[in-house]
Image (cartoon, helix red, strand yellow):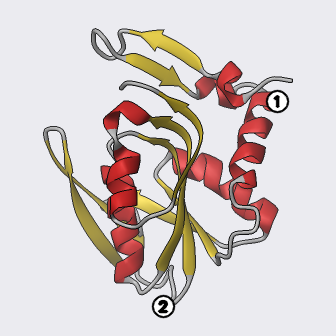
Amino acid sequence: MKKVEDYIRTIPNFPEEGIMFRDITTVLEDADGFQLAIDELQKKLEGMDFDVIAGAESRGFVFGAPIAYNMHKPFVLIRKKGKLPCETVAEEYDLEYGTATIEMHKDSIKPGQKVVLIDDLIATGGTIKAAAHLIEKLGGEVAAMLFLLELSGLEGRKMLEDEGYRVESVVSYPGK
Protein backbone atom coordinates (compact mmCIF):
# COMPACT_ATOMS: atom_id res chain seq x y z
CA MET A 1 0.00 0.00 0.00
CA LYS A 2 1.27 3.46 -0.92
CA LYS A 3 2.01 6.20 1.60
CA VAL A 4 1.39 9.93 1.12
CA GLU A 5 5.09 10.57 0.54
CA ASP A 6 4.96 8.21 -2.46
CA TYR A 7 2.75 10.79 -4.19
CA ILE A 8 4.95 13.82 -3.40
CA ARG A 9 7.36 14.91 -6.11
CA THR A 10 10.74 16.30 -5.05
CA ILE A 11 12.35 18.91 -7.30
CA PRO A 12 16.02 19.55 -6.51
CA ASN A 13 17.41 23.10 -6.56
CA PHE A 14 14.06 24.91 -6.77
CA PRO A 15 13.50 27.80 -6.27
CA GLU A 16 17.21 28.12 -5.60
CA GLU A 17 20.34 25.99 -5.37
CA GLY A 18 20.35 23.58 -2.42
CA ILE A 19 16.58 23.58 -1.84
CA MET A 20 14.62 20.34 -2.23
CA PHE A 21 11.14 21.54 -3.24
CA ARG A 22 8.36 19.21 -2.08
CA ASP A 23 5.63 19.44 -4.72
CA ILE A 24 2.14 18.46 -3.56
CA THR A 25 0.49 19.02 -6.93
CA THR A 26 1.24 15.37 -7.67
CA VAL A 27 -0.79 14.40 -4.58
CA LEU A 28 -3.75 16.46 -5.77
CA GLU A 29 -3.52 15.23 -9.36
CA ASP A 30 -3.89 11.60 -8.34
CA ALA A 31 -7.33 10.62 -6.98
CA ASP A 32 -5.82 7.92 -4.77
CA GLY A 33 -3.10 10.25 -3.52
CA PHE A 34 -5.56 13.02 -2.72
CA GLN A 35 -7.94 10.65 -0.94
CA LEU A 36 -5.05 9.18 1.06
CA ALA A 37 -3.84 12.67 2.05
CA ILE A 38 -7.31 13.66 3.29
CA ASP A 39 -7.73 10.35 5.13
CA GLU A 40 -4.32 10.62 6.83
CA LEU A 41 -4.92 14.23 7.87
CA GLN A 42 -8.36 13.31 9.20
CA LYS A 43 -6.92 10.41 11.24
CA LYS A 44 -4.86 12.96 13.19
CA LEU A 45 -8.15 14.44 14.44
CA GLU A 46 -9.66 11.21 15.75
CA GLY A 47 -10.77 11.62 19.35
CA MET A 48 -9.97 15.35 19.37
CA ASP A 49 -12.54 17.76 20.78
CA PHE A 50 -13.05 20.72 18.43
CA ASP A 51 -15.82 22.81 16.90
CA VAL A 52 -14.46 24.43 13.73
CA ILE A 53 -11.85 23.84 11.03
CA ALA A 54 -10.04 26.88 9.64
CA GLY A 55 -7.86 26.79 6.54
CA ALA A 56 -5.08 29.17 5.55
CA GLU A 57 -5.19 30.51 1.99
CA SER A 58 -5.01 28.78 -0.33
CA ARG A 59 -3.86 25.21 0.08
CA GLY A 60 -5.35 25.07 3.57
CA PHE A 61 -8.69 25.40 1.77
CA VAL A 62 -7.87 22.40 -0.43
CA PHE A 63 -7.21 20.12 2.53
CA GLY A 64 -9.39 21.70 5.21
CA ALA A 65 -12.70 21.90 3.35
CA PRO A 66 -13.01 18.17 2.57
CA ILE A 67 -12.15 17.28 6.16
CA ALA A 68 -14.73 19.76 7.48
CA TYR A 69 -17.28 18.22 5.11
CA ASN A 70 -16.41 14.66 6.17
CA MET A 71 -16.59 15.53 9.86
CA HIS A 72 -19.66 17.78 9.54
CA LYS A 73 -17.83 20.82 10.96
CA PRO A 74 -17.97 24.46 9.88
CA PHE A 75 -15.11 25.65 7.67
CA VAL A 76 -13.61 29.12 8.11
CA LEU A 77 -11.41 30.92 5.59
CA ILE A 78 -8.21 32.69 6.60
CA ARG A 79 -7.32 34.94 3.68
CA LYS A 80 -4.78 37.45 2.49
CA LYS A 81 -5.61 41.06 3.31
CA GLY A 82 -8.40 42.62 1.29
CA LYS A 83 -10.07 39.40 0.06
CA LEU A 84 -12.97 39.11 2.52
CA PRO A 85 -16.13 41.21 2.02
CA CYS A 86 -17.34 41.77 5.61
CA GLU A 87 -15.75 43.26 8.71
CA THR A 88 -12.47 41.52 9.49
CA VAL A 89 -9.82 41.09 12.13
CA ALA A 90 -6.23 41.20 10.86
CA GLU A 91 -2.79 39.96 11.89
CA GLU A 92 0.50 41.08 10.39
CA TYR A 93 3.49 38.74 10.42
CA ASP A 94 7.09 38.74 9.23
CA LEU A 95 8.31 37.28 5.97
CA GLU A 96 11.91 36.76 4.92
CA TYR A 97 11.84 40.16 3.18
CA GLY A 98 9.04 42.27 4.66
CA THR A 99 5.64 41.57 6.15
CA ALA A 100 2.26 40.14 5.16
CA THR A 101 -1.23 40.39 6.62
CA ILE A 102 -3.96 37.77 6.90
CA GLU A 103 -7.59 38.28 7.86
CA MET A 104 -10.73 36.50 9.03
CA HIS A 105 -14.31 37.70 9.26
CA LYS A 106 -14.96 39.04 12.76
CA ASP A 107 -17.99 36.78 13.15
CA SER A 108 -16.37 33.56 11.88
CA ILE A 109 -15.25 32.30 15.30
CA LYS A 110 -17.37 32.55 18.43
CA PRO A 111 -15.79 32.96 21.89
CA GLY A 112 -14.91 29.59 23.38
CA GLN A 113 -14.92 27.66 20.11
CA LYS A 114 -12.11 25.15 19.67
CA VAL A 115 -10.48 25.47 16.24
CA VAL A 116 -8.25 23.17 14.20
CA LEU A 117 -6.01 25.09 11.81
CA ILE A 118 -5.09 23.30 8.57
CA ASP A 119 -2.48 24.12 5.94
CA ASP A 120 -0.48 22.10 3.46
CA LEU A 121 2.98 22.87 4.84
CA ILE A 122 4.74 23.97 7.99
CA ALA A 123 8.11 25.58 7.40
CA THR A 124 9.04 28.43 9.78
CA GLY A 125 5.51 28.54 11.24
CA GLY A 126 4.99 32.30 10.82
CA THR A 127 1.77 32.17 8.81
CA ILE A 128 0.03 29.63 11.01
CA LYS A 129 1.15 31.45 14.17
CA ALA A 130 -0.50 34.60 12.78
CA ALA A 131 -3.63 32.55 12.03
CA ALA A 132 -3.65 31.28 15.62
CA HIS A 133 -3.45 34.84 16.89
CA LEU A 134 -6.49 35.76 14.77
CA ILE A 135 -8.49 32.92 16.33
CA GLU A 136 -7.42 33.98 19.80
CA LYS A 137 -8.34 37.64 19.09
CA LEU A 138 -11.87 36.43 18.38
CA GLY A 139 -12.00 34.48 21.64
CA GLY A 140 -11.40 31.06 20.10
CA GLU A 141 -8.97 28.40 21.26
CA VAL A 142 -6.54 26.63 18.92
CA ALA A 143 -7.12 22.90 19.50
CA ALA A 144 -4.42 21.85 17.01
CA MET A 145 -2.47 22.81 13.93
CA LEU A 146 -2.49 20.19 11.19
CA PHE A 147 -0.23 19.96 8.13
CA LEU A 148 0.29 17.51 5.29
CA LEU A 149 4.03 18.29 5.12
CA GLU A 150 6.61 19.45 7.61
CA LEU A 151 10.07 20.79 6.79
CA SER A 152 11.65 19.97 10.14
CA GLY A 153 14.94 21.76 9.46
CA LEU A 154 13.16 25.12 9.60
CA GLU A 155 11.97 24.41 13.18
CA GLY A 156 8.44 25.77 12.80
CA ARG A 157 7.09 22.95 14.95
CA LYS A 158 9.48 23.79 17.78
CA MET A 159 8.54 27.47 17.72
CA LEU A 160 4.80 26.66 17.80
CA GLU A 161 5.09 23.96 20.45
CA ASP A 162 7.18 26.32 22.59
CA GLU A 163 4.17 28.66 22.49
CA GLY A 164 1.91 25.83 23.67
CA TYR A 165 0.29 24.79 20.37
CA ARG A 166 -0.36 21.18 19.41
CA VAL A 167 1.26 20.48 16.01
CA GLU A 168 0.51 17.43 13.84
CA SER A 169 1.90 16.54 10.41
CA VAL A 170 1.48 13.55 8.13
CA VAL A 171 4.88 13.64 6.41
CA SER A 172 8.08 15.18 7.76
CA TYR A 173 11.17 15.93 5.70
CA PRO A 174 14.53 16.92 7.18
CA GLY A 175 16.17 20.10 5.95
CA LYS A 176 14.58 23.04 4.24
Taking the spot 35% from the left edge, 9% from the top edge, the residue there is: 13
Residue type pointed to by label 2: Pro
Vertical order, 144 against 88 (above or below): above
Q: Position of residue 74 (x, y in %)?
A: 66, 73
Q: Which residue is mark 2?
A: 111
Taking the spot 57% from the left edge, 52% from the top edge, the residue there is: 61
Secondary structure found at label 2: loop
Q: Position of residue 95 (x, y in %)?
A: 20, 44
Which numbered disc covers residue 32?
A: 1
Vertical order, 48 against 141 (above or below): above
Residues at circles 2 and 1 in contact by the CB criterion of under 8 Å: no
Q: Residues within 10 Å of mark 2 (few under 14, many from 20)?
A: few
Q: Earlier in the sequence, mark 2 or mark 1?
A: 1
Q: Quadrant of residue 135?
A: bottom left
Which numbered disc covers residue 93?
A: none
Residue type pointed to by label 1: Asp
Q: Position of residue 138 (x, y in %)?
A: 40, 84
Q: Position of residue 47 (x, y in %)?
A: 75, 68
Q: Quadrant of residue 46?
A: bottom right
Vertical order, 106 against 165 (above or below): below
Taking the spot 73% from the left edge, 44% from the top edge, the residue there is: 40
Q: Is residue 28 left or right of residue 165?
A: right
Farthest bottom residue in view = 111
Q: Residues within 10 Å of mark 1 (few under 14, many from 20)?
A: few
Which quadrant is home to the N terminus?
top right
Judging depth in this view, the residue of 42 and 34 nearest the camera is 42
Secondary structure found at label 1: helix
Taking the spot 41% from the left edge, 59% from the top edge, the residue there is: 79
Q: CA distance from mark 2 to mark 1?
A: 38 Å
